[in-house]
Image (spheres, rainbow, N blue to C red):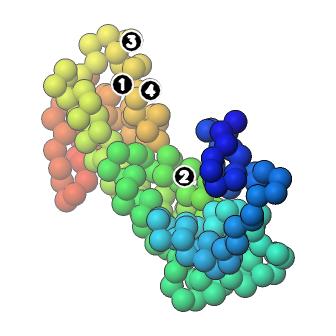
Amino acid sequence: MIHSDSGFTSSSDEDDEDFVPRSGAKKRPGLSLKARAVSLLSRREYSRAELARKLAPHAQTSEALDDLLDTLAKEGWQSDARVILSVVHRKSPIHGSLRIAQELKQKGMNDQQVAEIRHQLKDSELERAHGVWEKKFGAAGGAQTPAEYARQGRFLAARGFSHDVVRKILKASLTSASITSSKGNLDEESF
């Protein structure tokens, strides 16, 4: 345990929210629920569900929390659409639609929103997977052994690319077929 001059006791592995005041220590006035929410939102985008989880321990009632979340959304502080755009923009160059969909579900997005994003990402999935494969394995060329083929397949699958896309990329690398771009999508005739 670490004792600081401020009168609070904490362990070095715990977050600020887990500080326990020592007996006789002055209690610091707490932030309002809205101040906590704005503080969180000023650092990064949070989905409504994430923000509700973070703020629930500090809310007096669930109705007060729901009202605050509605107000924040109405005033433009919180937006699930911005969260989705942020995740897609950050993750799409290096991850497949399965991994992005999983992250969106973890953030509390509904199934309809996730399905729409997966549909949008599907059009560019083969091209994005080839870019990721090329960056990692392009200099070495295609898989020469079954073990290397499996390793490259696991690499792409772990990044959320579908099995069909992984198979197409690896098949193209085995046959040393050139993958050419046609109208923004890869030419599947070379597979």
In which quadrant of the rendered view does residue 35 lie? bottom right
Give how far apart the Cα atoms at labels 3 and 1 are. 9 Å
Helix, strand or loop at label 1? It is: helix
N-term mark: 2 or 1:
2
Q: Name the residue under label 2.
A: 103
Helix, strand or loop at label 2? It is: helix
* CB-based contact (under 8 Å), mark 1 and mark 4: yes
Q: Residue 51 carries which label?
A: none
For this view, does 62 lie left or right of residue 140?
right
- For the residue carrying disc 4, how many other residues have a C-alpha within 10 Å: few (<14), some (14-19), or many (20+)? some
- For the residue carrying disc 3, how many other residues have a C-alpha within 10 Å: few (<14), some (14-19), or many (20+)? few
**Residue ID at (54%, 89%):** 75
Give how far apart the Cα atoms at labels 3 and 2 are. 30 Å
> Relative to the observer, which residue lies in front, 10 or 43?
10
**Residue ID at (36%, 19%):** 149
For this view, does 133 lie left or right of residue 33?
left
Nearest-to-viewer mark from 3 and 2:
2
Q: Mark 3 points at which residue?
A: 147
N-term mark: 2 or 4:
2
Give how far apart the Cα atoms at labels 1 and 4 are. 5 Å
N-term mark: 3 or 4:
3
Please say whether residue 173 is visible from this viewpoint: no
**Which residue type carries mark 1?**
Gln
Q: Position of residue 186 (x, y in %)?
A: 24, 48
Q: Which mark is residue 154?
A: 4
Q: Name the residue under label 1.
A: 152
* CB-based contact (under 8 Å), mark 2 and mark 1: no
Give how far apart the Cα atoms at labels 2 and 1 are. 23 Å
**Which residue type carries mark 3?**
Ala
> Relative to the observer, which residue lies in front, 164 or 142?
142
